[in-house]
Image (spheres, rainbow, N blue to C red):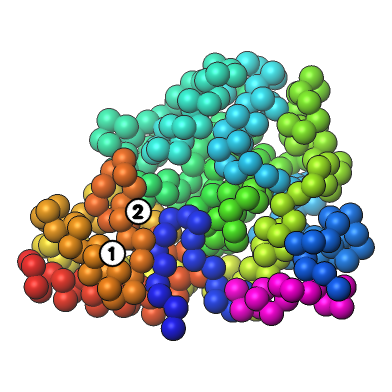
Amino acid sequence: MRKWNFCAGPAVISEHVLAEVKEELLEWGDSGMSIMEMSHRSSIYDEVATTAKQDFIDLLNIPDSHDVLFLQGGATQQFATVPMNFGHIKKKADYVLSGTWSKKAISEASKILEVNTIASSEDKNFSYAPDPKNWNLSEESAYVHYCPNETIQGVAIHDVPDLEKPLVADMSSVILSEPMDVSKFSLIYAGAQKNIGPAGLTMVIAEKSFMEADNPDLPNILRYSKHAESDSMLNTPPTFGWYMAGKVFKWIKKSGGLEFFKEQNHTKAQTLYTYIDNSSFYSNPVNIENRSIMNIPFILADKNLDSVFLKECEEEGLLNLKGHRSVGGMRASIYNAMPVEGVNQLVDFMKVFEAKHG
């Protein structure tokens, strides 16, 4: 039996997917070679890539107005690539500051264009998310950028803001966790290593008309439109990550799609939050309406017990529950591949630990 991995990323991958990949690792079909050994331009790999892309489009019901890119560099590269592509339009962009990752995005964008921080929750240590109704939008800005789910603080903006401006979102830790209306976004990016597959792949969903306005003075490798023209094969893509993502997309489809995972994810989160809220030993610092469904931080009443808690967790097969070094405490990341059973076992352990030390 595998242990329960609550890591924020690289994160848990479905055991079904891992077993399938294991079976295929030495040879893909009758090709005589591993999927990792074959050319990305071969007819065999082209079918793998095309199928994965279509499954992703099907899962999110992505309209024809948008295209999907399979890129490298992670979300961190997108912090710079987005303003490089679109900052030339108005030399200014609006950013929402709701946690560590949006703060990093602002820092990178500030090197390229003028950033207007239109809302911030830093005043209360990112324990809530700024309400979109109160965002102070600029009159002149190329786009609005926000992070719907802050992985580190466990803070979420659940409703997509309805804006008249191009909307850009870092969805690294929330993509594929539930259905969403892609048409409301001009660009979505997401590192794959949380809800999709192994690190090294970055998903981008971009509105075609938005991409057409990218900066023509950039090198092609940095332009979204050029990657789109080349079907994400302007250079050698992360072929193994793309292949594994395709396996995950098939698994999500077979499991019941995003509606199934929405229900399961909310059940898992509610189970853990309910126990924390009814405990005097554990607490969650985030405003209830802004609590993440994917990443749940919690604090022990006595921080001197943190190391004991983590040690006993590992002994029970509950892994990677240490909170991010910047905030401390604990954090349980419960992405799609974490079953309800894993969360139930965590809660059972927390009850025993509280009875022993509370």
Q: Residue furthest right?
A: 43
Q: Please say if 219 is above or below 236.
A: above
Q: Amino acid at mark 2?
A: Arg
Name the N-terminal-most of marks 1 and 2: 1
Left or right: residue 174 compared with residue 47: left
Tell me where residue 132 sits by quadrant. top left
Q: CA distance from mark 1 to mark 2?
A: 9 Å
Q: Quadrant of the C terminus?
A: bottom left
Question: At x 37% / y 41%, what residue is drawn?
Answer: 129
Q: Amino acid at mark 1?
A: Tyr
The front one of 119 and 24 is 24
Residue under pointer 2: 291
Is 37 a magenta residue? Answer: no
**Mark 1 vs 2: CB contact within 8 A:** yes
Is 26 a magenta residue? Answer: yes
- Considering the numbered disc 2 on the image, is that residue within a helix, a strand or a loop? loop
For residue 213, say whether it is visible.
Answer: no
Q: Residues within 10 Å of mark 1 (few under 14, many from 20)?
A: many
Over which residues does the magenta segment extend? 18-31
x, y percent for residue 237 = 76, 49
